[in-house]
Amino acid sequence: MSSNKLVAYWIQLKERGSDKKYWNLSELRSQKVGLYYGSIVDVFEDVCRCYMDYTYVDEKNEETFTVEFYERSGNLIEGQFLKGDSGVIANHFDKRKGSREYEARTTDISEEIPFYFLFYLPNNNTDRALLILREFENKGVKRIATDRFQKILRGVTRAGIYEDSRAVTQDYWSAIQRADRIKKIRLKGKSKLRSVDEVEGESANAQNINREYVLRPETTSFLPEILEPLFNKEIKYAGIELDEFDDRKITIEQGGSELTFSAVNPRVDMRMILNDTDVDIMGGHPTPETISVKAREFANYILDEYDDLHISEATILGDDYEYEYGEVDDSRGQDERKTTISDFQ
């Protein structure tokens, strides 16, 4: 089972009270809400810059957050976050020495896990930016990373609304065909429970009930065509009248990971499963430069789905873990102030 995957999100901003008009993220100063940034990419880079010099400690969730490194090229930034979990005492056992150190890890020690990220603002559709994050097993960095990102947008959040949403595809049939197996089919609907002698009529004692069927194929052989009837309300499926169920969900398995989506509104979350053959592993985690190549492939697949221009397939990350951080091209207008860590508190 693969322990690594890439997940994609769209980042958008809009005026508070507006349901439709999203801001042009390449021209934030034109919104006249006190922002001195030229684009959302500048905002994201300021977050990266600040948290390279400072580790944020979330006492409530017993987590830490920092930026290990990043690189920027035009409208694209990629790098690596470090997210730590603390609050648990652990013993350490040295396999080479054959010795154990009791309570080597105290509740104040945070075990950090690297999480690759890619942030990109398309050139032709500038009302939303693409954020790709690595997930490891059941761990992720989205909550704490986007929380830090929003802190810098205080000037925006007073007059605007920050939104993020999973990037999805309408091409659900391709997702089905790429699956390894059908895990389960769940049908849910409402009905009335009446007394036996009043089935055909309205009973004073009728009760609303929820009905649910869970169908689990007994074999691992995958036949995509057996799922086709689920997308058609007018026919029976396994002897069941589908139009009686307003919630029909399919769970498939791909690369050892489960994916569930609705047959009523078939929009599938976009994600990429990373097998160990796809990336180089160092210290139990993919190396940034090899995961970068897969992330760019994933990004271009998503950009195709939304008719956006492709990004370069060549990574801007090095392979020696010695990164040079050049001067940032700041086009911030009259106010040249840069964010300090006090802006995040």
Image: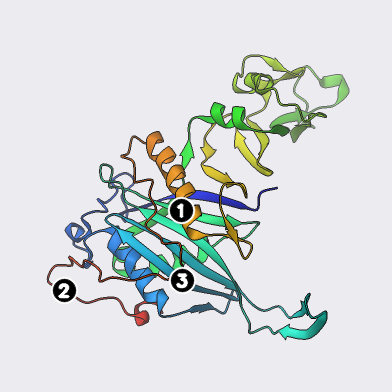
According to the picture, the residue beneath numbered tag 1 turns out to be 292
Residue 206 % position (x, y): 77, 31
Q: Secondary structure at mark 1?
A: helix
Residue sitting at x 38%, y 69% = 48
According to the picture, the residue beneath numbered tag 2 turns out to be 335
| Local crowd size for mark 2, using a 10 Å CA cut-off: few (<14), some (14–19), many (≥20) | few
Q: Is residue 91 visible?
A: yes
Q: Nearer the viewer, residue 143 or 78?
A: 78
Residue sitting at x 42%, y 71% = 322
Q: Secondary structure at mark 2?
A: loop
| Residue type highlighted by circle 3 | Glu
Q: Earlier in the sequence, mark 3 or mark 1?
A: 3
> Residue 311 — which label?
none
> Residue 68 — which label?
3
Q: CA distance from mark 2 to mark 1?
A: 34 Å
- Which callout, 2 or 1, points to the residue nearer the camera? 1
Q: CA distance from mark 3 to mark 1?
A: 15 Å
Whether residues under marks 3 and 1 lie with C-beta atoms below 8 angstroms apart, the answer is no
| Residue type highlighted by circle 2 | Asp
Q: CA distance from mark 3 to mark 2?
A: 28 Å
Q: How are the colours assigned in the image?
A: rainbow
Question: Image check: 123 left or right of 64?
Answer: left
Question: Image check: 29 left or right of 151?
Answer: left
Residue 134 % position (x, y): 53, 56
Residue 33 % position (x, y): 22, 64
